[in-house]
Image: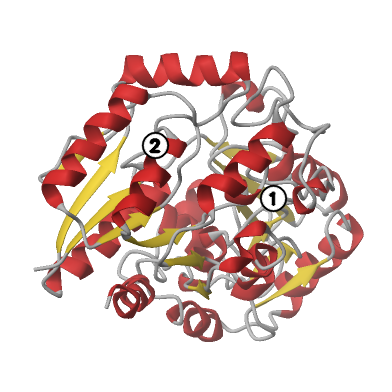
Amino acid sequence: MKTIVFINWTNVGSTGRIVYGISALAQAQGYRTFHAYSMSRNVLPQRENDLIISSVPVKFVSTRLAWLTGLNGCFAWFSTLRLLKKLDELSPDILHLHNLHNSYINLPMLFRYIKKHRIKVVWTLHDCWSFTGHCPHFTLCGCERWKTGCGKCPQPGVYPPLLPDTTAWLWKKKKKWFTGVEDLTIVTPSQWLADLVKESFLKVYPVKVIYNGIDLQTFRPTPSGFREAHGFAPSDAPAPVPGKPRYMVLGVSFGWFESKGLDVFEALAEQLGEDYRIVLVGTDEALDARLPKNILSIHRTHDQKELAQLYSAADVFVNPTREDNFPTVNLEALACGTPVVTFATGGCPEGVDEHCGSVVPVDDTEALVREIVRVCESRPYAPEACTERASRFERDAQFARYLPLYE
């Protein structure tokens, strides 16, 4: 029986779900799987075959040292040593790496071990961090120093933050650590990221695109009383209803930063007419004080079914993200029968085709308004076309594409 060990920074969130989803399919095919991650305050209860790399105190100390020294990924010595001793016991046939940033694991120790024992590696990249001297994303600041060696970083304070600018040193070290593995395949969740990898020092490895899938049993057209409860006119009303907004514009994010386009929604709230009302999910009390009164703020949903109800209730899903890899929120909206209008950011255009939504240039708010109005008032995209597009990204079908890599 072949053994796979997954390594990721956490067991929660999107990457945590991806790890366990791929692992379940691999187990069904006869593999023995283990999941290594670091502890944090919001991790899920430990499961069978879980391996804890760093405790909460160790991770805190390591990340603080990384911030103070700029030597990200160079601490957690004893935690990493314990993991490597466990790998000696398990003798894995494959290591499947995911997010390695934020100093929960010692990178030179890990990659020396991989090279010494000639372990086969699959590495799924969820951002650009693996081939930069510091940052997971560089689109917003327009930096291309990652192609030549970094240094003079324009955003040293972004995650994972650095006090001294060591980005040139880290770029050289990452190139040394991450290259030279005998058998390594890189997987990216978008063609956009794959193309960037081919311009980086990781271009020495084969790159395969496997999209992040969605659960079509959860995300599907789901009726609810949301529109009625919040004063919207019925979606099938033949004429405007006095005093009630006719169109629901939905935005969803799990952190409303500049990169996610909160300011764009604020502008939309001024430019769209009285027939439109924006609903934002993932806000908090601090944002509530900033948002215009005609934006309905929802801090969180109780579960994914409630999120599917919101997607289904909307007339259009808008994603003005300025920095992204391949956002699954676009696919979730499509799976619920709702068309998508998104900025041409990263892999966003890869999820939408001409039958289910549209893509506009980044920061072109006028074009965004025109498309929102066209989608809502002309109804050019049938719900069936949206769900058909989403079906191409079914979760298990995408995860199953990893199995030939393991073989």
Residue 80 place in picture, x, y as percent = 31, 31
**Residue displayed at 68% across by 72% down:** 349
Give the residue at mark 2.
109
- Name the residue rendered at 73%, 60% in the picture: 345
Residue 72, located in which quarter of the rendered image?
top right
Q: Amino acid at mark 2?
A: Met
Residue 385 in picture, x, y percent from top left: 55, 86
> Would you identify the image quadrant in which residue 326 lies?
bottom right
Query: What colour scheme governs how the chains and residues are painted in the rendered image of this protein?
Result: secondary structure
Regarding residue 55, the answer to whether it shows in the image is yes
Above or below, 322 against 292 in this view is below
Secondary structure beneath dot 1 equals strand
- Number of numbered discs overlaid on the protein picture: 2
Residue corresponding to mark 1: 277
Q: Which element carries disc 2, helix, strand or loop?
A: helix
Determine which quarter of the picture holds residue 168.
top right
The image quadrant where one finds the C terminus is bottom left
Q: Is residue 152 above or below residue 340?
A: above
